[in-house]
Image (cartoon, rainbow, N blue to C red):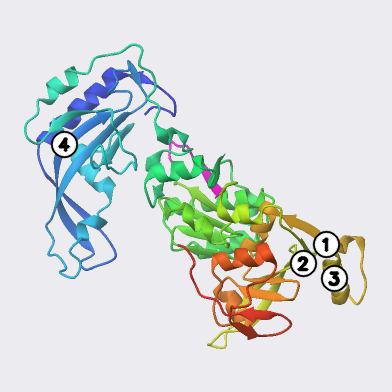
Amino acid sequence: MTSPGERVPRERFTKVLISICRRLDEGPRIVEWEQRYVLPLRQRTQVSPRSLWVFGSYERGAPECGDLDLILDVEKKCLTEPDPSFPHILNLMPFKPQTTALIGRLANVRCHIGTPERNTSGLAHEDVRLIWAADGLDWCQAIRAIQIDPEATHFARPTDRFPLRPEQFSYAGENEDLLAAESDGLIQWEFIPLGEPDVEALESAEGAKMVAGSRGVGRETAKLLPHILSYMRNRFRIVDSGMGLEGASLRWGGCEFKLGMREFHERELMDLRTYEIDVVPHITRRGPNGIWRIFRGPEHPHVKRLTGKTYFVTNEGSLGLSEVTNLDENEYPTVGYAVYLYSTEDAALEAIREDHDGVLTEEMRPVAVTGDDLLQLVSLADVINIGDVETIAQTYKGLVAMGGERIATPDEVVTLLEQGRLPQELDEVGWGLGTYHALSVELVR
């Protein structure tokens, strides 16, 4: 197995390509796989190869290559009695069982299902060469026809900009769109390599809660949890706003962790509760192993609308966050977090004096939050209160805690932060000191 960035003589990949073509000559394969949406859950499918293309450095004749890039077109036939209410069951079939059945498990071979124009890499490829076809193409001659070019070097793929290999993550769209979002400044990203997990983090209250909630996750996913604890502890952020672990997704402190191959999309950043998306693939020998942090860029609409906007919060406890509790419809207590924002320092000082019977120490002085800090703080809140005048809920917990009727949309939350109040035409529901608005649910997921 080659390490990341290592190049090996192309002859090694030529032997691999020959073995692949011989395997494809053997014809269709039967694949058994499982899904969890319609009965029967276990499916039997016949997969038949139609065409195989090679691209990348090998196709360009490079004397040394880092890996072998392939595109495989596959025809699928369902052998299980189909559910008439769900005729598109084959669309649920994952890609890996198809490639494993047809070409085997091969190190440093990237095989994408589809055609050069549309395939599972999420990118269209023009510089490709047809190597094998079901209609009897002479694949030996097709391989020999590739001329070695001593000047050919590493094939620069657009996906090289990703800090992870494309087969390490699952993006809910075309990879071209994700690259375009980063180029346009809608999003930014950074990669944090995994280090040694912090043993103390495992013994903390957060660690105990995470361990208790991870009993249903897979073994490889569970290996990531100590690293996530270390990541959250070592970064300057408030992490006591609740943790929710569900399958391969973990929401904690405004971070939406996508573990293993959990699907993600940058539109999740339109939800003000999501401060960043953290893609954490399973740990492998090849790697890279780390946390791919995706966050809003300077051209993101929320960032542009809130540029230069400053609020003041009390410098106590969790920096402006306070617990709010109420009973839900089943009479169970629901605990949420409210953030209290003030448009001026004087207003924040007055609120502090009221809460402390007129006493004000230097440690109590309010803190200004703006830009990225403001977005991070808002991501932790279930209820947002501005100057005890406007209050809205952006989660179900917040809705119960404040006794309102509906949840605010992301656009309405940004409007409140941008203008300091909401338009008068919104329906109002009176409660407590503030004015609670009845808003519709349009969270983008």
The residue where tag 1 is placed is 366
The residue where tag 3 is placed is 352
Disc 1 or 3, which lies upstream in sequence? 3
Number of residues whose C-alpha sits closer than 10 Å to that of mark 2, classed few (under 14), some (14–19) or many (20 or more)? many
- Residue 122 on image: x %, y %: 34, 43
Disc 1 or 2, which lies upstream in sequence? 2
Residue 259 appears anywhere in the view: yes
Identify residue type, mark 4: Ser
SS under mark 1: loop
The residue where tag 2 is placed is 342
Q: Residue at x 49, y 48 (%)?
A: 280
SS under mark 4: strand
Residue sitting nearer the eye, 78 or 23: 78
Number of residues whose C-alpha sits closer than 10 Å to that of mark 1, classed few (under 14), some (14–19) or many (20 or more)? many
Query: Which of labels 1 and 2 is toward the front?
Result: 2
- Residue 130 on image: x %, y %: 18, 29
Disc 3 or 2, which lies upstream in sequence? 2
Q: Which residues are magenta?
A: 283-295
Disc 3 or 4, which lies upstream in sequence? 4
Q: CA distance from mark 3 to mark 2?
A: 11 Å
The residue where tag 4 is placed is 51
| 418 falls in the magenta region | no
Q: Furthest residue to the left?
A: 136
Q: Which mark is residue 193?
A: none
Q: Are marks 1 and 3 in contact (CB under 8 Å)?
A: yes
Up the image or down, 105 lies above or below 245; here it is: above
Q: CA distance from mark 1 to mark 3?
A: 8 Å
Identify residue type, mark 2: Tyr
Residue sitting nearer the eye, 375 or 223: 375
Query: Which of labels 4 and 2 is toward the front?
Result: 2
Query: Which of labels 3 and 2 is toward the front?
Result: 2
